[in-house]
Amino acid sequence: MDTITLTELEVYYCVGVPDAERAQPQRLLLTVEMQHDFTRAAASDDLRETIDYYAVSRRLLNFGDGRSWKLIEKLAADIAAMVLTDFG
């Protein structure tokens, strides 16, 4: 398996236990590691054979729109589920 890493992607999500903390989006820096076998992508030079990390980053930028989380752990689980479902 190979790894693509998005490092310190700046996003703004509403997260925090107190209501006041979730009232406004907060700046977060996300690092997301995605594992994939890139053998076919390297051989074919075909974007469809790999993980489009630009598409993942665009999706993450909008992932928090209209949503909020109390726990950062829940946010991380939701991000992981989205990446696996939409880009796995």
Image (cartoon, grey):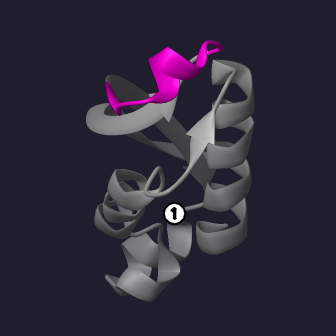
Q: Is residue 34 magenta?
A: no
Quadrant for the C terminus, please. bottom right
Q: Is residue 30 above or below residue 11?
A: above
Q: Which residues are magenta?
A: 17-26
**Residue found 31% across the figure and 63% down from its top:** 58
Q: Amino acid at mark 1?
A: Phe
Q: Is residue 57 above or below residue 79?
A: below
Tell me if I can see residue 6 in this picture.
no
**Residue found 64% across the figure and 33% down from its top:** 69
Q: Is residue 66 above or below residue 49?
A: above
Q: Is residue 18 magenta?
A: yes
- Of residues 42 and 85, the one nearer the viewer is 85
Q: Residue 86 vs residue 22: left or right?
A: right
Give the x, y percent position of residue 36.
61, 56
Q: Residue 81 vs residue 47: left or right?
A: right
Give the x, y percent position of residue 79.
62, 46
Q: Residue 47 vs residue 21: left or right?
A: left
**Residue found 47% across the figure and 71% down from its top:** 50
Tell me if I can see residue 41 in this picture.
yes
Residue 18 placement: quadrant: top right
